[in-house]
Image (cartoon, grey):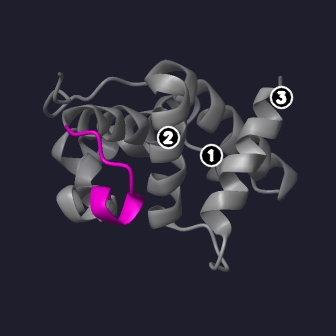
């Protein structure tokens, strides 16, 4: 059975097919794939560790943001559980707000997301709670 690094690399390979950079859409796609295959809790561990490892390897460990990474997993998991959609493009058409990087500002004060604590550890939303199933 492959380890987390191999699983992450497999998901990244799928996400990065036909694209040249890892942007927000790719982050959402990666998280959606991980949630669907491994469940929200395991997806969070897998994606967060993988992104952190990738940022370190690229010489930019400061680019990893613990709260942002987990928050996207939480929101994507909620929407993925609402409807069993097999195709990422269809999923994003039904949940287009997830493609807006500013969506987290509905749930977090900007100062909270900018804090060093939020960058290194999970911080719960302080503006509005996440939706729950």
- Residue drawn at the location 82% of the way across and 26% of the way down: 3
Give the residue at mark 3: 2
Marks 1 and 3 sit apart, C-alpha to C-alpha, by 24 Å
* Residue beneath the point at 62% across and 46% down: 64
Q: Seen in the image, is 98 located left or right of residue 39?
A: left
Q: Could you tell me residue 86's position as x and y percent?
A: 38, 50
Q: Earlier in the sequence, mark 2 or mark 3?
A: 3
Q: Is residue 46 visible?
A: yes
In 3D space, how far apart are the residues under numbered discs 1 and 2 (Cα atoms)? 8 Å
- Front-lying residue, 97 or 92: 92
Q: Residues within 10 Å of mark 3 (few under 14, many from 20)?
A: few
Q: Position of residue 121 (x, y in %)?
A: 53, 25
Magenta range is 83-91
* Residues marked 2 and 3 touching at CB (< 8 Å): no
Q: For the point 77% across and 49% down, which residue is it? A: 54
Q: Nearer the viewer, residue 118 or 80?
A: 80
Do the residues bearing badges 1 and 2 touch, measured as CB atoms within 8 Å? yes
Q: Nearer the viewer, residue 36 or 56?
A: 36
Check residue 44 in the rendering and tell me which mark sits there, or answer none. none
Judging by the rendered image, the residue that carries numbered circle 2 is 69
| Residue tagged 1 | 64
- State the quadrant of the C terminus: top left
Q: Which of marks 2 and 1 precedes in the sequence?
A: 1
The spot of residue 80 in percent (x, y) is 30, 39
Is 43 situated above or below 83?
Answer: above
Quarter of the figure with the N terminus: top right
When asked about the image quadrant of residue 113, the answer is: top left
Q: Nearer the viewer, mark 2 or mark 3?
A: 3
Instruction: Give coordinates of residue 48: x percent, y percent.
Output: 61, 35
Q: Is residue 34 magenta?
A: no
How crowded is the residue under tag 2: few (<14 C-alpha within 10 Å), some, or many (20+)?
many
Mark 2 residue element: helix
């Amino acid at each position: 059975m492959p380890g987390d690094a191999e699983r992450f690399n497999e998901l990244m390979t799928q996400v990065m097919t036909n694209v040249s950079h890892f942007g927000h859409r790719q982050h959402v796609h990666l998280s959606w794939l991980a949630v669907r295959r491994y469940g929200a809790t395991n997806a969070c561990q897998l994606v967060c560790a993988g992104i952190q490892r990738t940022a370190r390897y690229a010489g930019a460990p400061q680019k990893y943001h613990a709260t942002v990474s987990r928050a996207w997993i939480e929101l994507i998991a909620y929407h993925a559980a609402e409807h069993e959609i097999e195709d990422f493009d269809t999923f994003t058409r039904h949940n287009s707000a997830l493609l807006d990087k500013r969506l987290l500002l509905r749930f977090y004060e900007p100062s909270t997301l900018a804090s060093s604590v939020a960058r290194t550890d999970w911080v719960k939303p302080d503006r509005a709670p996440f939706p729950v199933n």
